[in-house]
Image (tube, coloured by chain):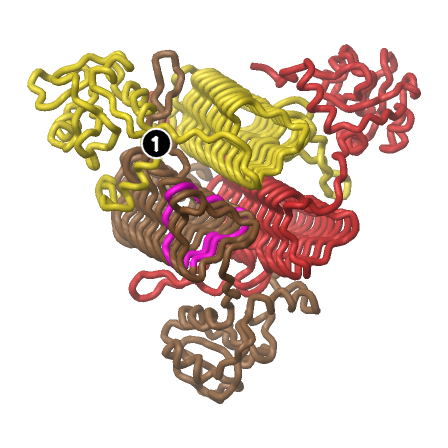
Chain colours: A brown, B yellow, C red
Amino acid sequence: MGASPLEDKTGRGSRLVLILKSRRQHSVADLARLCGATVRGNGDTLIGGIASIQSAKHGDLVFAADSNWLQKALASQASAVITGDFAGEELPKAVLLARDPKGAFARIAVLFSQKERRSGIDKSANVDPSAQLGKDVWIGPGAVIEEGVQIGEGTSIAANVAVGAGVSVGSDCDIGPNVTIYSGSELRNKVIVQAGTVIGSTGFGYVRDEHGRYELFPQVGRVLIEDEVHIGANCTIDRGALDATVIRRGTKLDNMVQIGHNVEIGENVVIAAQTGISGSSTIGSGAIIGGQVGIADHVRVEEGVILGAQSGVPTNKIVRGKGVVFWGTPARPIREYLKELATLARLTRKKGS
Amino acid sequence: MGASPLEDKTGRGSRLVLILKSRRQHSVADLARLCGATVRGNGDTLIGGIASIQSAKHGDLVFAADSNWLQKALASQASAVITGDFAGEELPKAVLLARDPKGAFARIAVLFSQKERRSGIDKSANVDPSAQLGKDVWIGPGAVIEEGVQIGEGTSIAANVAVGAGVSVGSDCDIGPNVTIYSGSELRNKVIVQAGTVIGSTGFGYVRDEHGRYELFPQVGRVLIEDEVHIGANCTIDRGALDATVIRRGTKLDNMVQIGHNVEIGENVVIAAQTGISGSSTIGSGAIIGGQVGIADHVRVEEGVILGAQSGVPTNKIVRGKGVVFWGTPARPIREYLKELATLARLTRKKGS
Amino acid sequence: MGASPLEDKTGRGSRLVLILKSRRQHSVADLARLCGATVRGNGDTLIGGIASIQSAKHGDLVFAADSNWLQKALASQASAVITGDFAGEELPKAVLLARDPKGAFARIAVLFSQKERRSGIDKSANVDPSAQLGKDVWIGPGAVIEEGVQIGEGTSIAANVAVGAGVSVGSDCDIGPNVTIYSGSELRNKVIVQAGTVIGSTGFGYVRDEHGRYELFPQVGRVLIEDEVHIGANCTIDRGALDATVIRRGTKLDNMVQIGHNVEIGENVVIAAQTGISGSSTIGSGAIIGGQVGIADHVRVEEGVILGAQSGVPTNKIVRGKGVVFWGTPARPIREYLKELATLARLTRKKGS
């Protein structure tokens, strides 16, 4: 079991891929202009799609991260390669040289992977007459749009989505199938929400009475999700208790991320899968949070902090240090954590011998 | 990034909040009677809603947890404050004094946050003619109710929910959008299930044969969820293998909690987000289980135990001690765990010096 | 709170169970033939269902794992017991002796727990005219089948499922309610997907630009799920970036498992609930992965490895050893891990004394 080759190169597989690709071709020179790269070799080479080095065919552009991958790319069936400035002189096929080749490849890829844009309201959708829909909105089959909902221009709401009363979704958003957006939520523009995610659920705030029974503390606040936030599949984002749960511009959440009530997440934060953030915690802009991290309530993770996968931050803690990596539970600077692991291994060996 | 202020105080935001609030006003004296508080200042002050101290406006009641917050509350625009018995004599606005001010605030909040009660069957719902629906039931758009389902009086089934054949849901339950309740499940009264949760899925019980292949052990049991259980969004609760998975009265589950087959959870247990409990384990009444906790199979967590976030309990273990906090994997009393962390840090420093 | 007795033995509960059972009866001799067991006692005894020892009634077959359970089984109301070769001579009721009694019980159980097979297209389903449906396919209410979808013979698509353009689902598959299968996914035969799962979501691959903003790296690959793979409820399986995410034949996933882009999972792997596998990692055939395990990106878990619950494997690591159990974060052989725990406890006690 090596790297992942394209399993099925025959009829059906190719057809699936075609659905996702536009059929337009672009010259290497045009692509270079688009992303600020320089061209070696024949700039007139026509490119019709992107591919991995393993699965590339004639007409494809591939990305090579280093000189090792570049050798493989040049030996592949691809028609052109995009790579870093390090590439040597002798190049048997068209090559684009970019300062940030991965980013340049991402920008080019958008040209070739545009999904077909639908607009209109499917006849089986349930749209309340009081809803206000912008131009070129798509409401998929079985989607439910309740009273007073506002949906901006160019936004797509997929099949069987449920959007509660008074929700506001901005323009150019993409809401996947089976998503639920509860009343009291506001999504701004260019927000992507993948299938099965729940936004605006009731937070987990209870008051215990003298008999040990639990009564719900009011959970009547809002959710605000700013521009260009991407939310993965099967996430849950609770509404604020009295105020708002906020996710700022440009932040990206992987699948199955849990965001508690009154949490505030800054701009351009990334949070990997299965991480949970408890009530009233704040995450500073530019933080990077690994998978399966647990952040308790009333925590402050400051700007630019990096939390390693599976680490845990206890209640009320402040974690600070731009670019500092933390690991373990309770989370501590990774150098410290690794030293502790080494100490423990050493003492165990000593005892064993 | 401090505490979470209400982002948008203008038109649209306010409208969203209004949807969730009734417009009725109550006097401070009436509210005090409701929750057994005593009044200082003008009992005739009219209250139209609840709010956080940061976002309060004229006509709002706010909650102050301690004397620090009380100062802020008294300086806010709120018309009244509810707080503990400690408040001094000089109070510039109406104040309710309660023994359990947080619980009292929760009880008052219910008055102001009643959701509009709908009843009827949406024309796009799919209800089998053999289903028995109580008085004032609401079946939302796209919801699917299969043969022989029983739904009690006043229960609400939201958009695009799927309820399998023979399921029984009691009265005054609230089932969120896109929930799935498989055949073989019984929910009693006043149960809340938030969006995307799955109840009655097939458990993860396989038999490995001599060729290393897996065959499903029969998973044909039931799920029983008793009165006043609350289940968060995107949870999964497996049916029993041959008998039942049971969640007793008053227990509360946060989002993305996983309950395996044949698990039994006692009364008034709270389980925070992303915790998983494996097959045939039992959780005693009054236990408190943090987020991302892992409980293996055939474990017995006894009455009143507290399991800290991210802790792990291995197969077959018994965890006991009312009010004792456990932490770490394998879970041990928190004092022990913290001492071990201190020992390790000390030995590491010593070696480093 | 002991083992889980069947809560409700009266009218309603029994009715629920009946829905799942066929009413056909089989003789003990016939059941023995089916699973290669030998019979002690009366082979003509008629069996109408399976049950747990606690809840068994006349006409039921029960399973006894050891001689302890056998005593209880023989004292129960069950009409017959299946157990291992160890059972003695004196047996008061019909007994089936099997080399692998648990597997034999599982095979017999299938006879009694067949769900009613439906076929046809519900009138509220949305099936694109270009979709190709095999014989005896069932498309449930509110399900959405987009253009060019292919569904094989005998496959069941439950209520409110969304199947994207060009998806291929093989024969005899069972897709639960509220599942989403994005465009670009291929499921082969006898695949089971439980409610709320998302297949083919966009992977979490971003390129950070010089301003700290994130741009999506192209995520336009596929998902391939081979024969007899079972996927639990509320899982998420991302499509490949450029190539495919692959799950090989016979592998079983519990609930809330997250599979990142370009992951390849071998044959007959089992993965317990809430485990996450990051991008481009590979899992060898026959591996056993516990609950809440975290596997970072570009990891190689080799054939037959066993990863204990909550363990963590860092980026780029190779974990190898057929049948070797690993535990902890970073995951290490369990003997080593347990010794380290013992060392730490010993040193802490010493310091304390």
Q: Is residue B213 above or below residue B56?
A: below
- Which residue is at 45% across, 21% downward? B269
Residue C94 is situated, as x and y percent measured from the top left of the image, at: 87, 17
Residue to which mark 1 is pinned: A219
Q: How many marks?
A: 1
Label 1: which secondary element: loop
Q: Chain of mark 1?
A: A
Left/right of residue A288 with respect to residue C130 in the rendered view = left
Foreground of the two, B98 or B119: B119
Q: Which residue ends up furthest to the front in the rendered image?
A: A129
Q: Which image quadrant for residue C41?
A: top right
Q: Nearer the viewer, residue C31 or C104?
A: C31
- Residue B219 is situated, as x and y percent measured from the top left of the image, at 68, 30
Image coords of residue B262 (percent x, y): 61, 25
Which span is picked out in magenta? A155-175
Residue C207 lies in the magenta-colored region: no
- Quadrant showing the C terminus of chain B: top left
| Quarter occupied by residue C207 | bottom left
Secondary structure mostly taken by the magenta-highlighted segment of the chain: loop
Q: Where does residue A64 sit, x and y in percent of width and height? A: 48, 73
Q: Please report the residue visible at 73 percent of the width from the left and 54 percent of the height from the top.
A: C133
Q: Nearer the viewer, residue A29 or C21?
A: C21
Q: Which amino acid, by three-letter code, is at mark 1?
A: Gln
Residue C335 appearing in the image: no
Name the residue located 35 percent from the left edge and 33 percent from the top edge: B341
Nearer to us in this view, C112 or A100: C112
In the shown orientation, is residue A147 left or right of residue C3?
Answer: left
Viewer can see residue B51: yes
Viewed as shown, does residue C12 lie left or right of C353? right
- Identity of the residue drawn at 24% across and 41% down: B6
